Image (tube, helix red, strand yellow):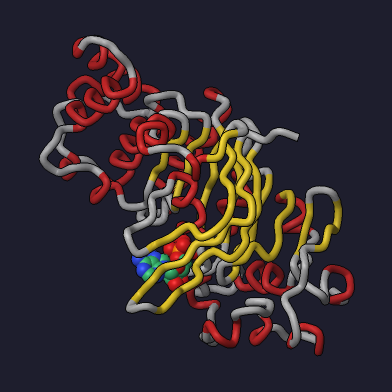
Amino acid sequence: MNHLLSVKDLEVSFYKESKEIRAVKGVNFHIEEGEIYGIVGESGSGKSVATKSILRLGPDNCKIKNGEILFEGDNILEKNNRELRKIRGNEISIIFQDSLTSLNPVYTIGDKLVELIRRNQKISKSDAKKRAIELLDIVGIADSKSHLKSYPHELSGGMRQRVMIAMAISSNPKIIIADEPTTALDVTIQKQILYLLKDLQKKLHTSIILITHDLGVVAQMCSRIAVMCAGYIVEEGTTEDIFYHPSHPYTKALIASVPKAGRTLERFIEKTITEEENENLCPFFSRCSYAIEKCRLALPDNYLENDKHSVRCYVRGEKLGE
Ligand SMILES: Nc1ncnc2c1ncn2[C@@H]1O[C@H](COP(=O)(O)OP(=O)(O)OP(=O)(O)O)[C@@H](O)[C@H]1O
């Protein structure tokens, strides 16, 4: 079956002073047209590295060691720089958490949008300006015409994130990667931005890969979810599978940690596991209260709970007795 995007056996490492840090370890997932796919997991689990690798956006000391990233059937990892530029921002856009550093402070919103539009479409400056106003209207920026003259620091965080979304949709991309798009915003604004993303996904029929720490956000937004732990996808399924029939002890623990006041996913890490301890075993092994002897010996395969629900665990699902 042809998916819009398929990530296969992705392995990504960083190199620091001749030491290898394996950030993404054999990750597989796919995206369908028009779906919102969520990736959740604690801080440092590899969510950003895995998704930035789709556009080959890693820093110099980061290397994609293995895998295929098939977009509409073609492997992005085999594209030359010119072909890659055509995909970046045109077919696949990315929205980052920190809009203030992503937007250049010396350019107005209008300058940036017009430049971006003209990079992708051969149209006049005045037509690009009209399109920029239209885009600001679409993302809900009131008085769009005069806001073209605003500098990033003159806008609120929520407005800047709307501008980032306008930039991301300016070329009608097939996929938007939204990397913690609301983490820096307060709760009410977060809701508005998520509502905007969902609304745009429906109207434009774009697919979204949504990376977040926030399980509440994925529950509301996504049709399918991948749960990452220390570079592995340990569980993947529909939103219903993940929330009503979580199968991996790590997923269960993540879900259980949410209602407890003051606990965030970062603080859920109560014990740091060394890379050596973790390397070829289940990444949750040393924190798992269900671990059995087998877990000490080898990394489990992916087991299918149903055709959309897979889990990398020996002691999974109903056997956990909950
Ligand atoms: N610039 C870097 N240099 C070295 N190692 C890095 C670098 N960036 C990431 N890593 C490694 O990759 C791992 C995964 O990082 P990544 O940013 O993908 O995590 P994440 O799940 O997106 O976390 P967060 O939610 O905090 O953004 C980190 O734990 C770290 O070991």
Q: Nearer the viewer, residue 89 or 67?
A: 67
Name which residue lies at 82% across and 75% down.
314
Measuring from the top left, give residue 130's x and y in whole percent. 26, 13
Total of numbered circles in the picture? 0
Horizontally, is 289 left or right of 25 in the view?
Answer: right
Looking at the rendering, in which quadrant would you find the C terminus?
A: bottom right
Horizontally, is 81 left or right of 23 in the view?
Answer: left
Q: Nearer the viewer, residue 66 or 34?
A: 66
Residue 27 sits in which quadrant?
bottom right
Residue 250 sits in which quadrant?
bottom right
Name which residue lies at 41% across and 79% down.
19
Regarding residue 278, the answer to whether it shows in the image is yes
Figure quadrant, ligand 1: bottom left
Measuring from the top left, give residue 135's x and y in whole percent. 35, 23
Regarding residue 213, the answer to whether it shows in the image is no
Q: Nearer the viewer, residue 255 or 259?
A: 255
Name which residue lies at 54% across and 30% down.
206
Name which residue lies at 54% across and 35% down.
198
Measuring from the top left, give residue 145's x and y in whole percent. 21, 20
Of all residues, the one furthest to the left in this rendering is: 106
Measuring from the top left, give residue 124's x and y in whole percent. 22, 10
Horizontally, is 218 left or right of 247 in the view?
Answer: left
Looking at the rendering, in which quadrant would you find the N terminus?
A: top right
